Image (cartoon, rainbow, N blue to C red):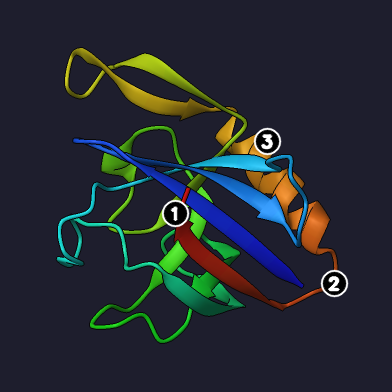
Amino acid sequence: MKLTLKRDYQDTVTYGNLYIEDDDIPFLVTLERPDLNNAPNISCIPEGMYHCKEVYSPHFRSNLYELQDVPNRTKILIHWGNFVEESLGCILLGMQRMDLFNEKTQKKEPAIILSKKAYQRFKELLGDNKEFTLEITHG
């Protein structure tokens, strides 16, 4: 199975749309760190083709999908979360983009909503597949 993530780079975040195979309609939305030249923990990863496989994450206490062979980076996961600060370079999944009030920063920020529901939908799409290909491009 192949998925495509088409990114929309912004100053403080990177939004994206996730597509199945060659479909024209996005399946889910994504949220990532801004593009800061692949700096660990503060940047999204480079565009490219990645092999993803299911791994156990002790932090999330769950099986998640990890992008393999990311240049100069490790442990890049696809998981749930609403705000960019909930990612150290990982890809967050959501159902919709929205500006939300962040309790931690006490201000309104770019976010995605219904993230756990989106991750459930993602897992249902993959079914028994433990691996897939993800192409990341500029939208």
Distance from Cα at disc 3 to Cα at disc 1? 15 Å
User: Which is closer to the viewer, label 2 or label 1?
Assistant: 1
Q: Which mark is residue 119?
A: none
Q: Find disc 1 in the rendering and name its residue.
A: 91
First of labels 2, 1 by sequence position: 1
SS assignment at label 1: strand
Label 1: few (<14), some or many (≥20) within 10 Å? many
Image position of 43 (left or right of 23) = left
Distance from Cα at disc 3 to Cα at disc 2? 18 Å
Residue 4 higher or lower than 19, as above or below? below
Q: Position of residue 112 (x, y in %)?
A: 47, 29
- Residue at 58% x, 69% y: name it: 134
Residue 28 higher or lower than 23, as above or below? above
Q: Find disc 2 in the rendering and name its residue.
A: 128
- Amino acid on which the number 1 mark rests in the picture: Ile
Q: Nearer the viewer, residue 37 or 54?
A: 37
First of labels 3, 2 by sequence position: 3
Q: Quadrant of the N terminus?
A: bottom right
